[in-house]
Amino acid sequence: MTRITIAALALIVSSGCSRETKTTADDVKRESTEAAQTAVDFTKEQAARAKREGEARIADLDRRIDELDAKASKASAKAKAELQAAAKDMRAESKRLKDRMSTWDDKAVEAWQTTRIEVEQAVSKAEGAIDRLIQKARN
């Protein structure tokens, strides 16, 4: 019984090995198209994730600008004017960054990645500035 099973397996394996598989131009075209679509899908996912993260950071920045405005209302006249002007500038920067991010869906890979870097750097700069302003308002 064991010999019959081994012989049957050997026959199956040897018949599978004797077949030649040929890669056709259509196979290459189909696989290339699938790979390209996978790359496009991956890039779209990356862009969507970067956009969500950027939007969350900007929303946090907006919340902190509101906090700065609240602190400004309790500050001395000179500090109040300075903090309100800074908050106004920060709101303009926040709007600029939101507008910049709104173009990501329409851009090629290299373009949205460049824009993403620009937005991330600008948000980081704005976050640092707002930190300093909030600290200044506390003092």
Image: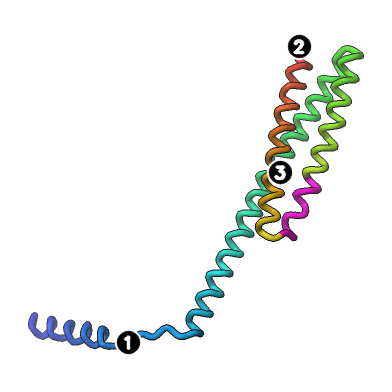
Q: Considering only order in the chain, which callout, 2 or 3, is on the residue closer to the N terminus?
A: 3
What residue is pinned by disc 1?
20
Q: Considering only order in the chain, which callout, 1 or 3, is on the residue closer to the N terminus?
A: 1
Q: Amino acid at mark 2?
A: Asn
Check residue 106 for magenta coloring.
yes
Query: Who is closer to the viewer here, 97 or 68?
Result: 97
What residue is pinned by disc 2?
139
Label 1, secondary structure: give it: loop
Q: Residues within 10 Å of mark 3 (few under 14, many from 20)?
A: some
Q: Determine the CA span between mark 3 and mark 1.
A: 53 Å
Q: Which residues are magenta?
A: 98-107
Q: Determine the CA span between mark 3 and mark 2.
A: 32 Å
Q: Determine the CA span between mark 1 and mark 2.
A: 80 Å
The percent coordinates of residue 80 (x first, y second) are: 88, 18
The residue under the point 16% across, 83% down is 10
Task: Name the mark on residue 39.
Answer: none
Task: Name the mark on residue 118.
Answer: 3
The percent coordinates of residue 100 (x first, y second) are: 78, 48
Query: Who is closer to the viewer here, 112 or 90?
Result: 112
Q: Is residue 137 above or below residue 36?
A: above
Check residue 3 for magenta coloring.
no
Quadrant holding the N terminus? bottom left
Q: Amino acid at mark 3?
A: Glu
Q: Is residue 4 above or below residue 89?
A: below
